[in-house]
Image (cartoon, grey):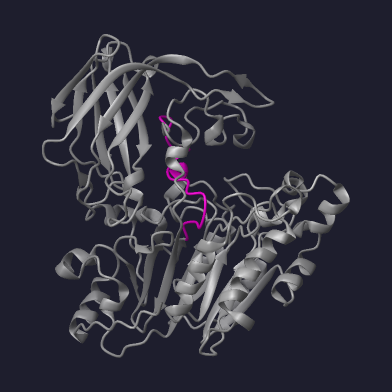
Amino acid sequence: MKNNTKMEVSQQARNDLSRRGFIGGFAALGAFAGCRSGFFAAEGERPLLRFGVVSDVHVRLAAGGKGLAAGYDTETLEKTFAYFRDRGADAVMIAGDMADKGLLGELKTVADAWYRVFPDDCAPDGRKVERLFVFGNHDSFGLKNGRAVFADEATLRREAIEADPRRAWDVCFHEEWKPYFVKNVKGFDFFCSHWQPGIWCNGIAETGSAGCADAFGASMAKCDPSRPFFYVQHSHPRDTVYGKCAWGVDDGTATKLLSRFPQAVSFSGHSHEPLTNEKSIWRGAFTSVATGSLRYLAAGAVWNFARTAGYENGPCNYYLPGVRREDRPDYMAKYDAPKMMPSELSRHDIRVGQLVSVYDDRIVFEKREFVSGLSIGDDWVVERPAKPRSFASRASTARPAEFPTGAKLKVVRTTAKTRGLKNPKINIPSAAKPALSLAFPAATVGGQVAEYEISAVGGGGARYDTRICAIGGLYPRAHGNFGKAVTAMIRVDALPSGAEKIAVAPLDSFGNRGRSLSATIPAVLDGETQVENAEGF
């Protein structure tokens, strides 16, 4: 469905927006806040360039390659492609992980979906729509992961993309595969890095695209400094989006390269973090943008390694000193044996992407959830030329959500089972333990809630801190799952000795804290208490 809506705004307002620049300027614009990018286009103004961005499609074949695995249809992918087509996209980017098990049949499924929407790489009006697709880690080690589909080694070697990426790319997209390539779309350069075949993923220093500097450095140096260029790889450039605690970062190669070019805008996937996280865009020596994911939302994973408290409904709540992170049994959420809340609570399969519009004086990033078809929050707007905006400066103007007036925290003492762990390295059985069930309404008043912090203080000042991802806060406000009440389950034996009260506070993406609710911890099984909208500690 085409969107031909035109909305007017004065040239002065557009200039004001450009001067105010990035996120935070919306507050000064008052009524403009929350509107889509079309609002900021003057009558008749057209973007110089428009392109769609998604990542982590993860198409998966069923056992034996007999069709797609259950739940892995391409309906949402085609819907996403069609949305970009109908909004006039000149190109579409996929920042890696198209084929979940790294198999040719999976990549071919993505290609077939593309050609159903863009026959011969063209929109219905005849315009060429460029493909900006790169491999991620899942595309690139099918000789290992593909065994889940093809047990026969000869078949696996024939079907694994890794075994012959050039053949796979030619079969699917009818062009020569190159590990690093450049495409020019309407005068704008896109530098694209495939994850190199056979390089395994560890999440903390990815080297899959480590050759990008040698491949692109000289060409980038020749680019017009007044004109943005775009870069795409699967892993996040180190120390950009999500800060130093991100999962899925590279070894620093891309950051070192792109820091030479203030006009550079990079896109990366891999972490599956939702676009409601305002740290998904970073403004430093260049602009770095995370793509979200079109499958497998993994909210909270990117913060986890920096906090020993961890996430009760996210991965890795404890550490094993002296053991390499990739060898730890707690490396993924399902391995976190002591937790009581299922990891699935942080993996709701909402599917997100962006439509990027480049104008003379700004770049606009529209964020969208493609199952519901709803927009996710305010657009991000980056002025041209771009100016650095630290997370700290943005945090100073951000506003966390608050609990509704009269909200209460309800605490019930009960019993619940821990997850347990079945792993070749260590086996921990699930166990029934005394637990606290915490129930409270969602924080929906005012600003954004990304997570909830649960705290308790015991004798001698010992603290218990954990967090849970605010699942309802990940959805657009008009979505049916937005604003649903929250129930958390935590182990009593995790609380410090002498703890009498427990508190819950809403936090935004930057860690700004809203007012907390607190309640007395019941002393007996099935007892409960409620404290009306009391401040925490």
Please provide percent x and percent y for residue 531: 14, 25
Q: Residue at x 33, y 23 (%)?
A: 464
Q: Left of 61 or right of it: where is 473?
A: left
Q: Can residue 481 be spotted in the picture?
A: yes
Please provide percent x and percent y for residue 420: 54, 23
Locate residue 503: give its quadrant.
top left
Q: Is residue 252 above or below residue 145?
A: below
Please provide percent x and percent y for residue 256: 54, 61
Q: Residue furthest top?
A: 524
Locate residue 164: give its quadrant.
bottom right
In this orientation, which residue lies closer to the viewer: 472 or 274?
472
Q: Can residue 227 be spotted in the picture?
A: no
The range drawn in magenta is: 291-309
Q: Left of 238 or right of it: where is 324?
A: right
Q: Is residue 103 above or below residue 497?
A: below
Q: Residue at x 61, y 81 (%)?
A: 119
Q: Residue at x 60, y 30 (%)?
A: 328
